[in-house]
Image: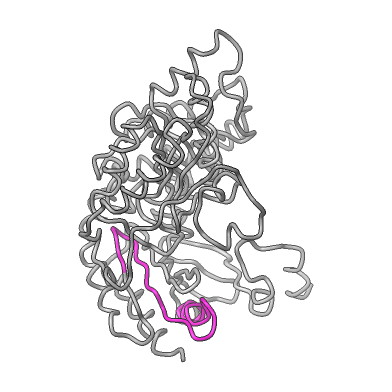
Amino acid sequence: MKTSDWIEPYWLPFTANKAFRAAPRIIERADGHYYFTDDGHKLLDAFSGLWCSNLGHNHPKIVEAIQQQAAKIDYSPSFNFGHPKVFDLAHLIADQFPGNLDHVFFVNSGSEAADTALKLAIAYQRIRGEGARTRLIGRARGYHGVGFGGVSVGGMVNNRKYFGSLLPGTDHLSFPYDPDAHGFTHGQPSIDVEPYMRELEAMIFLHDASTIAAVIVEPFAGSGGVYIPPAGYLNRLREITRAHGILLIVDEVITAFGRLGAENASTLYGVEPDIVTLAKGINNGAVPMGAAVVQREIFDTFMEASKDGVEFFHGFTYSGHPLAAAAGIATQDVLKTEGVYDHANAIIPYFEEAVHSLKGEPHVSDIRNIGLACGITIAHREQAGDRATDVFKAAYTNGVYVRNNGDDLAIAPILTFSRSDIDLTVETIRDALKSVS
């Protein structure tokens, strides 16, 4: 069968399919820090899969855990039944989060985690007698998956503009970043957060707190281009939402499990949200899995509202899937026993200096980094993303995988990268920038 016929039935997600069909990139296998394509191309994975393969690929402990679980229980119904590993993983996850964030609702992706969190927030407000609290507030550049709820509170234009009015009653905070004033930021910008907090307070004044269920934000805008709020931003959001009875949902699909050199951003920044959404690094992307970690008070409110029967009419066929849970337990074990967080923290300063060495290279208009994540804005020629796409392709040709979204090139190293891996990544991008017109 010709390659063109073989690939034809598959509609690739978030992909320019016509361009892909003209020059397909087929990953055949992976090992450690590398992908290998069907045409023999060796590709350093400098984007951790899609922000998810934090430990690299085919880690032997994770592979073994999945194989053993498949031989024991391949699938267990998620409604009215549990299996041992899903309870074990719930403990491992809950123990990592601050305060009373101690109940875990498993799903299969970050998109499902976001929609689950939004439904929990609205239902919780209704159960406790505040049914008028249905409004949801997100943020410009925010990404909370591709469900209708996540797209509604998300702030990425192309994800929204094709799909009608989406959920009614959503608002969006502006993103606290001014490239002219805050460009080439190292870590969290040291800028005044209060103008952005006054914006939230104005929304509360306009709609009244009694109509607002929740605010949802990422610790930094990952899929939106690695844009980073100022220091103290999450802390002040927590103060204001709590004062007005509004739930704070923090989307840690990208930031949890080591991307910032810590178990999660909530603990790192000293913030206790009401709900945290997870996915990706929860089990190294080995089997689809996500979760919403929920405050005990929210869980207890649902339990106490119903004397019997289903307390929360929500869930998925594959929630807490046995293979995903086994992979999750193995992943959490590796993170704790193999010094991954310590290594990530040690390499972050080197990564920061390396990526900022690209300042002054052709077409670079901004560089931002936080932890092991970096966004590089590349000036376009005629339309958004044209030159950044060329840089992505040039890096690929020269053996390094990074990702571009519009004009923003994103780097997300595997947490166990060495200095030489970072050097190879940065120098390949440098050469790619010089090679494009």
Camera-side residue: 205 or 365? 205
Res. 82 in view: yes
The location of residue 141, given as percent across then percent down, is: 45, 59
Is 372 one of the magenta-colored residues? yes
Camera-side residue: 70 or 54? 54
The part of the chain drawn in magenta is: 368-395
Residue 250 vertical placement versus 230 (above, below):
above
Is 194 one of the magenta-colored residues? no
Camera-side residue: 427 or 326? 427
The location of residue 25, given as percent across then percent down, is: 60, 72
Residue 353 vertical placement versus 112 (above, below):
below
Residue at image point 51% right, 38% down: 135
Residue at image point 49% right, 41% down: 136
The location of residue 101, given as percent across then percent down, is: 36, 29
The location of residue 120, given as percent across then percent down, is: 51, 30
Q: How is the image coloured?
A: one colour
Residue at image point 58% right, 38% down: 70
